[in-house]
Image (tube, rainbow, N blue to C red):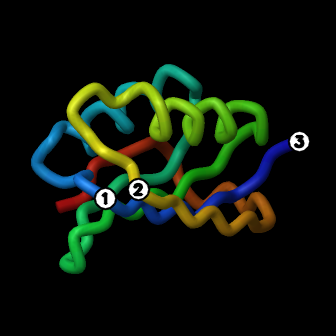
Amino acid sequence: MKKFAHIRVYGIVQGVGMRYSTYRKATALSLTGYVKNLSDGSVEIKTEGEEKDIMALIDYIRTGLRWAQVDDMDVTWGEYKGKYNDFDIKY
């Protein structure tokens, strides 16, 4: 089942390659949306795709980023709307 997820990641998550790693993993999972650094030091991810693929991305962010230290993550689920054509890094 396709879903939308708004994910905020907190900790040591900027300047450690998180945006690029998230982009690569999301693309490999055929997810659409974007990843972006926010001014408060967190990283924002908005993504759409199969729920199992979004869960795989969340698991990857929690455990698979070598240089990042993820202290907390907020995930808000929503309805799939087909809003994004691909997955991007926003600056």
Label 2: state its secondary structure. strand
Whether residue 75 sits left or right of residue 7 in the image: it is right
Q: Earlier in the sequence, mark 2 or mark 3?
A: 3
Which residue does the image show at 49% across and 52% down from the upper left? 33
77, above or below 71, in the image = below
What percent of the width, then of the height, locates residue 64?
A: 42, 26
Whether residue 8 sits left or right of residue 4 in the image: it is left
Q: Earlier in the sequence, mark 3 or mark 1?
A: 3
Tell me which amino acid carries mark 2.
Asp
Tell me which amino acid carries mark 3.
Met
Q: Nearer the viewer, mark 2 or mark 3?
A: 2
Whether residue 72 sits left or right of residue 80 in the image: it is left
Q: Nearer the viewer, mark 3 or mark 1?
A: 1
Disc 2: which residue: 71
| Of 20 and 30, the residue lying toward us | 20
The quadrant in which residue 5 appears is: bottom right
The quadrant in which residue 31 appears is: top right
The quadrant in which residue 45 appears is: bottom left
Separation (CA) of disc 1 from disc 2: 5 Å
Which residue does the image show at 50% across and 30% down from the upper left? 60
Label disc, if present, on residue 1 of the rendered structure: 3
52, above or below 14, in the image = above
Separation (CA) of disc 2 from disc 3: 29 Å
| Disc 1: CA contacts within 10 A as few (<14), some (14-19) or many (>=20) | some
The reply to whether callout 1 and callout 2 are in contact (CB within 8 Å) is: yes
Disc 1: which residue: 11
